[in-house]
Image: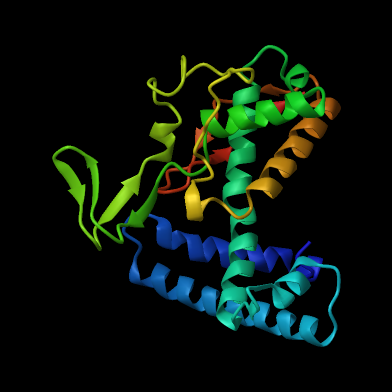
């Protein structure tokens, strides 16, 4: 979709992995320096291919981004690069974790394939997977102005706040029986993709990817079962499996 060579996939994943280690708890200087090198290499890669698309546009997403404009103003070079990296990076991290988390959740149920039969049912099941076991449990934001959260608790401009998305998705004041997996729930309002101006730019694609992938998986392997206790990665910020060993 982005229009970059398919054979560069492993390199893009490696750069992404290096960069997101900055989200981990207390990264070392070596991790910081490697993340910086990878970010520079990733940016140079996007700039090179964007320049090619300016000379010879195609029907890929990078061509669309190079031509994108709002109110007569085109994306700057840096905006184009950061947008492209964001889309590629998220696909290598959050979507991967969410797919694994969803498979684990579905395999704890009696007949997961039935929950994916038909587009409407598959969409509802994916939404519940997003709520039930999200790939990102926390994001941080800065207050631009004074905000009173509740009486006596205010944020001042420049102060940072941690948004606990995983906790919000399991708030008993917002969801009926939040630790129960229920694709037919009527109170579905998960915040796994964020909200407002920070709503995830790749949310529609992530939803489609999961609906297609999960449907195909359980159609082809209807007898799929977990054969070992699922093991989650000991990581900060992201929430995903180290491995999910199954049999069929």
Identify which residue, 68 or 181, lies in the foreground: 68
Answer left or right for 64 relative to 153: right
Foreground of the two, 175 or 230: 175
Between residues 190 and 231, which one lies in front from this camera angle? Answer: 190
> Residue lying furthest front in this view?
71
- How many numbered circles are shown? 0
- The answer to whether residue 90 is visible is yes
Q: In the rendered view, tell whether residue 223 sits above or below residue 149.
A: above
Q: How is this picture coloured?
A: rainbow
Does residue 227 appear anywhere in the picture?
no
Q: Quadrant of residue 100?
A: top right
Quick check: 184 above or below 131? Answer: above
The answer to whether 185 is drawn above or below residue 54 in the figure is above
Residue 238 in percent (x, y) is at 47, 47
Q: Position of residue 1 (x, y in %)?
A: 79, 61
For residue 12, which quarter of the picture? bottom right
Q: Position of residue 136 (x, y in %)?
A: 48, 44
Q: Residue at x 80, y 29 (%)?
A: 119
In which quadrant of the rendered view does residue 125 lie? top right
């Amino acid at each position: 979709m982005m229009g970059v060579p398919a054979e560069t996939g492993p390199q893009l994943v490696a750069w992404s992995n290096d960069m997101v280690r900055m989200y981990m708890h207390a990264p070392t200087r070596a991790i910081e320096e490697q993340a910086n090198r990878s970010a520079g290499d990733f940016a140079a890669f996007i700039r090179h291919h964007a320049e090619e698309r300016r000379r010879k546009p195609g029907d890929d997403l990078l061509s669309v981004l190079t031509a994108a404009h709002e109110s007569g103003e085109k994306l700057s070079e840096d905006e184009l690069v950061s947008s492209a990296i964001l889309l590629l990076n998220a696909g290598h991290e959050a979507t991967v974790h969410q797919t694994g988390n969803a498979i684990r959740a579905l395999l704890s149920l009696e007949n997961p394939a039935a929950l994916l039969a038909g587009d409407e049912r598959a969409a509802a099941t994916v939404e519940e997977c997003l709520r039930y076991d999200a790939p990102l449990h926390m994001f941080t934001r800065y207050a631009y102005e004074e905000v009173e959260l509740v009486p006596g608790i205010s944020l001042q401009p420049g102060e940072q706040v941690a948004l606990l998305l995983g906790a919000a998705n399991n708030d008993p004041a917002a969801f009926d029986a939040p630790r129960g997996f229920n694709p037919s729930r009527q109170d579905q309002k998960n915040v796994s993709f964020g909200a407002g101006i920070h709503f995830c730019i790749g949310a529609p694609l992530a939803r489609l990817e999961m609906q297609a992938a999960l449907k195909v998986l359980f159609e082809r392997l209807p007898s799929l079962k977990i054969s070992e206790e699922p093991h989650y990665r000991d990581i900060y910020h992201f929430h995903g499996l180290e491995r999910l060993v199954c049999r069929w």
